[in-house]
Image: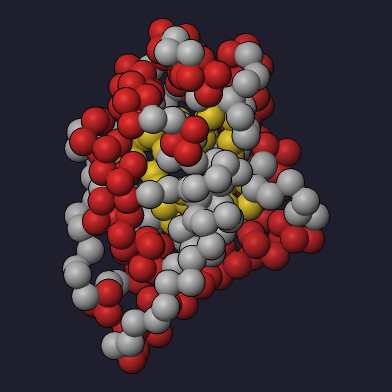
């Protein structure tokens, strides 16, 4: 499931390759319905792989994006993973009934910090079992974890049946780092996806994450990134990163 590394020269990157990586995040709690609609329309216009929306927005997003080819995913146990396993399962089943095609669940961060990896694995397994054939990604929230905990959390997610491990919700400080992506990729191997999210707000950062081993990117800056791809392809020019790690 690992993606091939992009060329070192970012002017050679194909826009379709970037689009296929992007889960466009529409998760901020203050977004109104009109805000959500504007971002759904932007995701459709830029033809990204999918959107990741708040659970209550899934049905609406599915209806609005029908026929666009853009998938609709959502989050489970968001943003801290502290809800019970039963609640996560119920939330997952509702999301699937509403039309979600992928689920990004937050691991039980408290259990992870306690070293209770059996509990983490069982929590993941319950959601994976409820999801059936639906892709489940497990958000580790790496900003809260040591390197050893990232390794253990990645292993617990894979043991629980997750298809991806993911860095961040975007609501903890720090966001994704290339070092954490490399560590996660080394831990899970080539057959499990690794999703970088949190602070990926420019093409340079996206490239860095892919080179480190990311196979999917979560970002709310999809338009900016794809506009950068088009600009660099047209002019051969690299622009400043200008990333904001405080945003998803």
Task: Report if residue 234 is visible in the image.
Answer: yes
**Residue 138 percent coordinates (x, y):** 45, 30
Residue in view at x 65 percent, y 62 percent: 39
**Residue 232 percent coordinates (x, y):** 34, 83
Q: Nearer the viewer, residue 32 or 188?
A: 188
**Residue 43 percent coordinates (x, y):** 56, 63
Q: Quick check: 42 above or below 2?
A: below
Residue in view at x 33 percent, y 91 percent: 235
Say which quarter of the image contains residue 64: bottom right
Total number of numbered labels?
Answer: 0
The colour style of the image is secondary structure
Task: Report if residue 69 is visible in the image.
Answer: no
Q: Nearer the viewer, residue 71 or 183?
A: 183
Residue furthest to the bottom: 235
Q: Quadrant of the N terminus?
A: top left
Q: Quick check: 230 above or below 143?
A: below
Question: In the picture provided, is 222 more to the left or to the right than 232?
Answer: right
**Residue 38 percent coordinates (x, y):** 70, 65
Q: Quick check: 60 above or below 199?
A: above
Say which quarter of the image contains residue 148: top left
Residue in view at x 52 percent, y 56 percent: 245
Residue in view at x 67 percent, y 37 percent: 55
């Amino acid at each position: 499931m690992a993606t091939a590394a992009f060329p070192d020269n970012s002017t050679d990157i194909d826009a379709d390759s970037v689009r296929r990586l992007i889960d466009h995040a529409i998760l901020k709690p203050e977004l109104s319905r009109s805000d959500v609609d504007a971002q759904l329309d932007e995701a459709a216009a830029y033809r990204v792989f999918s959107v990741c929306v708040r659970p209550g927005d899934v049905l609406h997003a599915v209806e609005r994006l029908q026929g666009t080819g853009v998938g609709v995913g959502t989050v489970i146990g968001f943003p801290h993973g502290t809800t019970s396993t039963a609640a996560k399962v119920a939330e997952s089943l509702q999301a699937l009934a509403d039309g979600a095609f992928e689920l990004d669940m937050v691991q039980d961060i408290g259990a992870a910090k306690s070293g209770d990896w059996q509990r983490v694995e069982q929590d993941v397994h319950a959601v994976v079992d409820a999801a059936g054939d639906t892709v489940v990604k497990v958000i580790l929230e790496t900003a809260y974890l040591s390197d050893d905990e990232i390794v253990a959390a990645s292993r617990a997610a894979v043991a629980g049946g997750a298809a991806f491990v993911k860095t961040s919700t975007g609501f903890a400080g720090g966001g994704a780092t290339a070092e954490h992506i490399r560590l996660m990729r080394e831990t899970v191997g080539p057959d499990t996806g690794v999703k970088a999210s949190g602070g990926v707000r420019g093409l340079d950062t996206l490239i860095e994450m892919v080179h480190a081993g990311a196979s999917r990117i979560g970002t709310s800056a999809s338009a900016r990134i794809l506009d950068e791809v088009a600009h660099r392809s047209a002019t051969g020019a690299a622009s400043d990163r200008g990333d904001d790690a405080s945003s998803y």
